[in-house]
């Protein structure tokens, strides 16, 4: 090309969760059966939508307006319904329907939220980082994502001192990102910690982003908090959606709640730019938005949410139990969402360890793939070749710690037990191999 057409941030567009799929397809084509533990799709892993939710969707298909465009910001009745739910939270920030904007899934929202920031304005995010956020933030700036530490020795909770120091000494930071419940760790942050982070933002005139896609998958004994309840007067954006709740990931239906827009003129102009950007696309998908008041407002919905949270809590306990006594790893019991992060202790992994792979072509391909990768990715590739289980290396989440993330989504009890047992056996065998 006579001009370089490549965006300065293109090299930061990395999504290990799906990129490992291409490798798994190679291994599958060489004869190894694959078990997908890399992506958080409940439908793919066998979960069925309750019949009553399916019936709501069936009825909406027969409504003529569900086939057309909706308002750019979203279906008015749905935004009014959601604003009412925000305003009903005790002691929370009040919003209007105009403070709610719909997107085609949170991936679309994330792209807009970072893509329409001034390039020099950075958002400090957690490490381990969820790849959609970290890649979008890095791509918008053209530089590596800026992160604060989640502490594996303190339940993967944020290191608040690290946040404070980075905000204080890096004046390019304009915002702070929080995920609670967190992906990939499943940590749920206590209210006092959230309020302390809000205090840092207030002191330094920053805005906050909270990804609350797993807000209703919180285990017993943990607080079910929404951003509007703890953010105070700090300008902020809360991200919500139905993909993990109904669950309906294929609907591509998410929204943001813009909080305290009136507290800062610059933040207000930025929020307005997100809606202006959405106008270029006309609108987001109509039918899934129309379902929200009918599904979330149904008296059966709280029971549905409670049943799913309890189900994932049981599976989390089951998974953690399989790693009891394993001296090579640190496994924190998650408190929400449906993931488990397994971290190898420092110095455990090296470039001599292997797993036995019976399939010759698979073994040859894995040996080629591990020639120049991080130690945890080496383990992940050997695991794939030997067992067919596909997990995501922890270093793929903008993280210096070595390990992997798996899901708690498998619905077949016997297969899920096999997955947990096989992972533990693979770790023991791999560590002992050299």
Image (cartoon, rainbow, N blue to C red):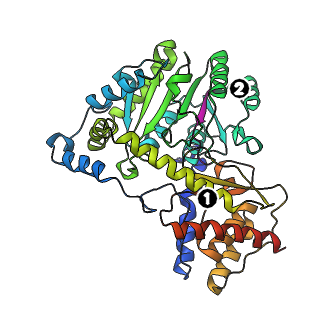
Q: Is residue 334 magenta?
A: no
Toward the viewer: 36 or 265?
Answer: 36
- Asked which secondary structure carries label 1, the reply is helix
The residue carrying mark 1 is 318
Toward the viewer: 333 or 343?
Answer: 333
Whole-number angstrom distance, CA of label 1 to CA of label 2: 39 Å
Residue 46 makes an appearance in the image: yes
x and y, in percent, of residue 74 in the image: 31, 33
Question: Is 69 placed left or right of 197 in the picture?
Answer: left
The residue carrying mark 2 is 167
x and y, in percent, of residue 117 in the image: 53, 30
As drawn, 353 above or below 74: below
- Asked which secondary structure carries label 2, the reply is helix
Which numbered disc, 1 or 2, marks the residue that appears first in the sequence? 2
x and y, in percent, of residue 118 in the image: 55, 28
As drawn, 269 above or below 13: above
Which residue is located at x 62 percent, y 65 percent?
420
Residue density around tag 1, few if under 14, some if 14–19, many if 20 or more, within 10 Å: some
x and y, in percent, of residue 154 in the image: 75, 40
Toward the viewer: 405 or 69?
Answer: 405
Q: Which span of residues is magenta-colored?
A: 174-184
Question: Is 236 placed left or right of 105 in the picture?
Answer: right
């Amino acid at each position: 090309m006579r001009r370089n057409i490549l965006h300065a941030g293109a090299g930061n567009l990395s999504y290990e969760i799906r990129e490992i799929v291409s490798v798994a397809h190679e291994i599958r084509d060489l004869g190894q059966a694959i078990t997908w533990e890399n992506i958080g799709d409940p439908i793919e892993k066998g979960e069925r939508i309750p019949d009553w939710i399916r019936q709501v969707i069936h009825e909406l298909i027969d409504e003529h307006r569900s086939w057309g465009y909706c308002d750019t910001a979203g279906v008015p009745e749905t935004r009014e319904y959601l604003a009412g739910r925000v305003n009903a939270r005790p002691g929370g920030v009040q919003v209007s329907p105009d403070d709610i904007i719909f997107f085609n899934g949170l991936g679309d929202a994330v792209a807009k939220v970072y893509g329409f920031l001034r390039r020099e304005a950075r958002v400090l995010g957690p490490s381990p980082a969820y790849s959609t956020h970290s890649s979008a933030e890095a791509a918008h700036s053209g530089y590596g994502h800026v992160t604060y530490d989640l502490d594996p020795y303190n339940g993967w909770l944020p290191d608040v001192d690290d946040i404070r120091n980075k905000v204080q000494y890096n004046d390019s930071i304009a915002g702070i990102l929080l995920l609670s419940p967190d992906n990939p760790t499943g940590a749920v942050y206590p209210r006092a910690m959230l309020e302390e982070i809000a205090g840092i933002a207030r002191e330094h005139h920053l805005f906050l982003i909270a990804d609350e896609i797993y807000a209703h998958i919180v285990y017993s004994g943990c607080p079910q908090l929404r951003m509007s309840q703890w953010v105070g007067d700090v300008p902020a954006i809360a991200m919500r959606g139905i993909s993990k709740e109904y669950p309906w990931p294929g609907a591509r239906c998410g929204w943001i709640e813009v909080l305290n827009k009136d507290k800062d003129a610059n933040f207000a102009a930025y929020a307005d730019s997100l809606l202006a950007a959405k106008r270029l696309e006309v609108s987001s998908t109509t039918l899934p938005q129309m379902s929200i008041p009918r599904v979330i407002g149904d008296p059966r919905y709280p029971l549905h949410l409670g049943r799913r949270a309890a189900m994932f809590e049981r599976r989390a306990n089951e998974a953690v139990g399989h790693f009891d006594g394993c001296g090579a790893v640190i496994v924190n019991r998650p408190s929400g969402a449906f993931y488990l992060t397994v971290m190898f202790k420092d110095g455990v992994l090296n470039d001599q360890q292997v797993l036995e792979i019976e399939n010759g072509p698979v073994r040859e391909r894995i040996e080629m793939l591990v020639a120049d990768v991080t130690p945890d990715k080496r383990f992940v590739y050997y695991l794939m070749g030997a067992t067919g289980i596909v997990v995501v290396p922890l270093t793929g989440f903008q993280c210096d710690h070595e390990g992997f993330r798996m899901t708690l989504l498998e619905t077949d009890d016997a297969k899920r037990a096999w997955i947990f047992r096989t992972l533990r056996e693979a770790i023991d065998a791999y560590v002992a191999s050299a």
